[in-house]
Amino acid sequence: MATILTGRSRVVLGSCLAALPPATAYAHALTSTPYVMPVPFWMYVYGCAATLVVSFAVLSYFWNAPALAREVASRERATTAVSDGWRWVFRLLQAGAVGCLLLTIGAGLVGTGDPGSNINMLLFWVLFLLGFTYLTVIVGDLYCVINPWRAMVGRLERAGVDLSRPRVRYPQAAGYWPAFVFYVVLIWIELFALPKPFLLSIVVGVYTVMTGIGVFLFGHDTWFRQCDVFGVFFRIVASVAPVEYARSPDGRSYRVRVRPPLSGARQNPGEGDLSLVLFVLFMLASTTYDGIYRTEFWVGLFWRPMLALFEPVWGTDLARAQSALESWFLVYQRAGLLLLPFGYLAFYLIVLKWAQAFTRVTVTLRELAVDFAYSLVPIALAYNATHYYPMLIAEGRKLPWRASDPLGLGWNLLNLFPPLVDPLELRMGTVWHTQVALILIGHVVSVYLAHTIAVDTFHTRRQVIISQLPLLFLMVALTVIGLWVLSLPLAG
């Protein structure tokens, strides 16, 4: 038995420490099957970095800051439109959202424990957190209109329960920290908890109860703006969308306004709070960590030094070493998720400190951090789409069969034919090139957005251009990191 365990440990360790072959990409969000690229990997990095530099040069040369700022403002006023005809559509969508929430909770409680057959896993993790995110980029913050928790609160208020008046004053220092903590817990569950429908139902149910308590204490406006993790998340995503929704004073109807894309990110929605800046950075860091924490590089970063350090104790008995260090490895994995956003924050603040020193402006570092935080949103969205769009395609097409048998009990409510045994799979070449394109587009958009924010922040064209040099360095670095993470093979 000891011989078998030792041999098995050697295989595991060997797979963890294997080197990445040159010109090989893995696109590990979909599969660990290697894909041989038509050109060396460094050429992809060079091409993407060069595109960002050229984009910066073009913006700097042709940009007429004052004139463009006035033009954008005039276009925003010209495209404003108010519509009340959407009320019935919003109510229908709201009812559907409440139904999906109740189905998510109920299916996990009474349905099958198989995560591949219970509809609540598909509804929450794939359609809501992925599909609805990408839809928000196009249609705006539709979540603020159809928020199922807010809909239930509205129903209680119409029944006579006062949930608008705060009973406890919300601490100003709390900022968006509750939403950030909820976000960390959500990603923690996604990465480290076993995919169990019952567990998901309990988590969503507990969050529903906490939402009710929070609304009762602080009032629904404060809670859904600063504490609801999904409300904050989708509002940030919607900052790049060409559509905006505004609630009427009575809260029962909404105005729909068409605006230039990305204009929402220029309205300083951070309200001077660093907790929201950290929330934006965690959107970026969590996706990066999801892509790296199971790779040979990250796993080997722990096992190489630890096995070398304790070799005098265990010698060649790798099975014993692995068993003794396993708990420390779990701590290492979870600590990485908690520390990475703060590492991104430190890098981000250093870059802005350079911009502050180069331009010699009186704007504080805190103000710069808040102003430019939303310039990272396109990158965060590009990373998200890069890592998860294959999953959305693969799992999303299973929706008809999940809807026909939502509890996984063998029903066929829609009388559908069985799914194909061998469904069409995405080609690795297509996946890789799409991922590279998404990363590049996201960073180019961020370069443009950072330039528009600089126009609003700094007073002269010279300051605008100089301030963008450190931010250009940040964008190039994030591009390289994103491509490198995609190329890493998974550990065995």
Image (tube, grey):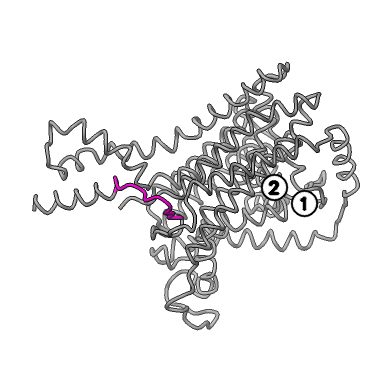
Residue 282 in percent (x, y) is at 54, 38
Is residue 161 shown to the viewer in this render? yes
Residue at x 74% of width, y 44% of height: 262
Tell me the tag on residue 243.
1
What is the span of residues highlighted in magenta in the rendered image? Answer: 16-27
Of the image marks 1 and 2, the number of the one nearer the N terminus: 2
Looking at the image, do the residues carrying marks 1 and 2 touch, with CB atoms under 8 Å apart?
yes
Q: Secondary structure at mark 2?
A: helix
Instruction: Say which quarter of the image contains residue 54.
Output: top right
As for residue 19 lying within the magenta part, the answer is yes
Is residue 169 shown to the viewer in this render? no
Q: Residues within 10 Å of mark 1 (few under 14, many from 20)?
A: many
Front residue (pair 260, 476): 476
Q: Secondary structure at mark 1?
A: strand
Disc 1 marks a residue whose amino acid type is: Val
Q: Answer with left or right where residue 175 lies relative to residue 288.
A: right
Front residue (pair 219, 480): 480
Residue 74 in percent (x, y) is at 90, 42
Q: Answer with left or right where residue 242 lies relative to residue 227.
A: right
Q: Does residue 372 lie above or below 215 as drawn? A: above
Residue at x 57% of width, y 53% of height: 385
Residue at x 44% of width, y 47% of height: 189
